[in-house]
Image (cartoon, rainbow, N blue to C red):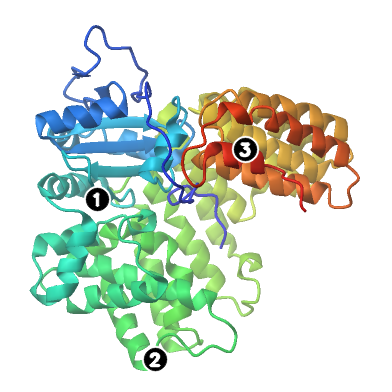
Amino acid sequence: MTRTTHHLSLDSLRWVGLLSLSCILMIACGRTAPEGDTVSERTAAATEVAWFEGTPDEAFAYAKAKGKPLFLYWGAEWCPPCHYLKDKIFHRPEFVGRSREFVAVYLDGDDASAQILGEQLDVQGYPTVMVYSAEGEELLRMPSDVPVSRYAAIMDRALRLDRPVKEILDAVLAVGPARADEADLDVLAYYSWGQDSQIDLAEEERLETFRRLWEETPGGQVGVRARFLGLYVGEAASRARDAGEGDEPLLGEAERVRLTEAMLALLADPALCRANVFDVTYGAEGAIGLLQPERGTGRTELIEAWRTAAVRFESDQELSTDDRLTALAASIDLARLETETEADIEEAPLPPSLVERARKHVEWAVGSVSGGSELQTVLNTAAFLLDEVGLAQEAQDLLVDKLDEAEAPYYFMSWLARLKKDGGETEEALTLYRQAWESAGGRYTRFRWGSTYLRRLMDLAPERAEVIETDSLIILDELLTHDDAFALGNGLRLGQLEEAYREWNEDSTHDGTVGRIRDRVRSACERYPTEGEDSQRDRCLGFLEEEA
């Protein structure tokens, strides 16, 4: 099921590192330039993380000089899960206290040259949280899909790390999980595997690695084994989904029975469910399809156990408002799995009682938050759920009503535009896509929304060649003033835009327009450096390159 969610890999591309960076840091509520010595630590209240003031290069140098590990958070103003971290974790006293043991760096994707540094660090989406040794070696990527109460314990583990997570995995597999250090297994269980760039297991290795970690970890480490179970089942479900029609089943009958029993035990335990909240909320469809593909008693039992766990989340006081609201996604998936026709599960009808429950739960969640930052997270989930249960008009009404209260209104203008587009209101959709671009702020953010507007313009109004050319040149000219125009997220969006131009001009009707856009970009290529096998200048020259 396709969802508008940003928990994992929004800009999931790997790039070659290029340039060093200067002048980029920001804090959640604004920033002030340090006076005098730029290498300083911010004096903060007990409720705030002492984010380092200075460049990342200075932060790494300072960490080395002080012999302290470095905690780096990569985020963005518009990103709902980033606001979740800032609101629910970064202000917790236990997290703030532990953060004093690190050099804490907040890098925003809109800061000067941030996309270049993002390439060098190989960030995998918004948010990405990384821990480095005092010597500047990446040790760990921390997950953002765990309960807030667990995050401090993960920080404790990170603080004591003395080697990268890849070395930890190699050591665990060498002696076997049954004999491995408990702390090492804990690190692997709470590693952000979805954003991994260090271990980089081959596809054929991932499933076997997760199987071993789950199967061989001692039974006394219940929570750790449950995390490994989620990794194993999730990877197997992903592989099964990608398998060809005639391929052999990925798991044998005995293994499916064994995993079903393990999942039933996990779902029956509130604490284990809470520690695997992301898998329980989003993993139902894939896991049930993998473990119980045929209708029958086993499938019914697993569906009922999953539904009970999901409904329990909705009233779990230990979870955030957004987690409790998001739990409805599992109930929606489960209701569709129970329908007689599964050829197109997203079109399966939902029980009226579930639709009404979604409406009421959204009303409760939106009314429970104070606005601003927290609303950015909850409103994202609320609009998705209303749309998902067939209440698209109510989703639109909610977004319009709360737009001015959100931290980044342009993010939801794109939501509204998509809903208008799906409803056949083309002009209204285009107006909103344009407004989202025009009201967006920040270097990367403006191009992100500007490129989206251009792609939708070519798709919905391909005949407006003059507008497409005029607005393309405005958006690209602004991008080309930045030294990271072809790096990371900007590079990804340029690739999508290039594909859209080629598709729009498939019959060569718009050769002149595309040529002028290409020439405008080419005129700026000389300002970009040539260092590296895939330099920014090479990328610039390759944009809309004419085919031989």
Sequence-wise, which precedes: disc 3 or disc 2?
2
Residue under the image location 17 percent in, 40 percent down:
135
What residue sits right under mark 2 in the picture?
252
Image height of 154 relative to 374, above or below? below
State if disc 2 and disc 3 touch (CB < 8 Å).
no
Going from N to C along the chain, the mark reached first, 3 or 1, is: 1
Label 3 crowd bin: few (<14), some (14–19), many (20+), radius 10 Å: many
Query: Measured from the top left, where is residue 78 in percent x and y?
Result: 49, 33
Q: Residue 250 vs residue 267: left or right?
A: right
Q: Which amino acid does label 2 sit on?
A: Gly
Residue at 24% over, 60% down: 166
Which residue position is annotated with label 3? 540
Judged left or right of residue 516, residue 113 is left
Amino acid type indicated by mark 3: Cys
Q: Disc 2 or 1, which lies upstream in sequence?
A: 1
Q: Compare residues 369 and 132 and report the one nearer the observer.
A: 132
Quadrant of res 178: bottom left
The answer to which of 208 and 318 lies nearer the viewer is 208
Which residue lies under the disc numbered 1? 140
- Would you place residue 289 above or below residue 376 in this image? below
Residue 59 drawn above or below residue 98: above
